[in-house]
Image (tube, grey):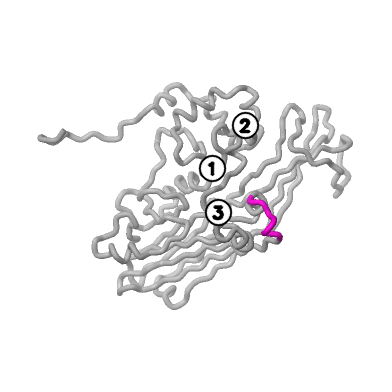
Amino acid sequence: MNLTMVDKIAKAVLYEGYMLYPYRPSSVKNQQRWNFGVLSPPSYSEAQHGSEASYMQTECLVEGGSLTRLEIRVRFLQLVARSVGRLRIRIPQLPPGEVPEFLPVSGLEVGGRVYQAWQEAVEREVALPMRNLEQLVHAPLSHLFTFPAGKELDYLRDDDGLIAGVVIREQLALDGVVEVKNTQLSPDLFKICVQVRNLTDFGGAEQASREDALLSALVSTHTVLGVEDGRFCSLLDPPDALGEISANRHNVGTWPILMGGAGERDTMLSSPIILYDYPQIAPESAGDLFDGTEIDEILSLRIMTLTEEEKREMRESDERARQMLERTETLPAEQLLKLHGAMRSLRPVEEGTR
């Protein structure tokens, strides 16, 4: 499995829509994020009459034999609710094991920094044990996974060293399952089916908001598949002999593509965003701008034109946003010039063509 190449593309898939220009929580377009690869709790999906999916399915073809082995990894983001509290009385130190009384607020300025309520994200990965393809034909794999609930408190001290506020990061428990089935279509051709399902219990789904449901969802979910002693078949350009079989594959909420160098067929990324085979991150890009349709030069220039107050909100909202702002503000002129355009290849014009 070509994980080096996969990781670069998967990062872009994971954080598609994480924050969009102008990269501030107060921006309307950043009030509803995470529109790709969202697997909601089943009860919420049912309450929304299926408009919010609770599972995704990947089907792909593998050319192989008795020695071919399959590796599967499922990756997604788990959202963390970040809230902010202001202490009613500032104190120098906390008694052991005691949580002080605080008032929830939307934002708080302490020590020259502004802390805001927001949704952060934690990367998750579920790695399945490798299986022989023939073994999967007779014994489908069902792999349950759980990520437990958690809560962290980060106390904020003012310039006098007194505790003035608190940042609370809370994540709910997530439960899911990855199911893998394999059908042998011919002695050297197999159809792999991978389903990823959210099994998280979620009460009050009828009255819940999407923002509440997202805290119990798998977000930006995608599947990475690899084979040893075998080859995946392209969905976009299948061999002529497999055209009809390839067209009958049933993918739900995801799009399998080949990864790696051109012609390599041992790694496949099943992405919630439609991509082409062998995608690459442009070498001129200085870093992720969290927008799959991004034009680095335009977005970089726009970031540079933000007011100081807008930059402050962007900087204080999120660590990834802060890194992006600092990277853009320190972008050398020669690097910015490279973003203006690039010539990939040249070829001679044949006679008689225009």
Task: Say what secondary structure mark 2 lies in.
Answer: helix
Q: Please provide percent x and percent y for residue 265.
A: 34, 57
Q: Residues within 10 Å of mark 3 (few under 14, many from 20)?
A: many
Residue placed under numbered mark 2 in the picture: 314
Span colored in magenta = 204-210
**Residue of label 1:** 17
Does residue 78 appear left or right of residue 75 in this picture? right
The question of residue 208 being in magenta is answered with: yes
* Amino acid on which disc 1 is placed: Gly
Res. 257 image quadrant: bottom left
Front position in the image: 204 or 353: 204
Magenta: main secondary structure: loop
Front residue (pair 329, 26) = 26
Q: Position of residue 306 (x, y in %)?
A: 57, 24
Q: Which residue is mark 3?
A: 38
Q: Position of residue 136 (x, y in %)?
A: 44, 73
Amino acid type, label 3: Val
* Horizontal side, residue 173 vs residue 328: left or right: right
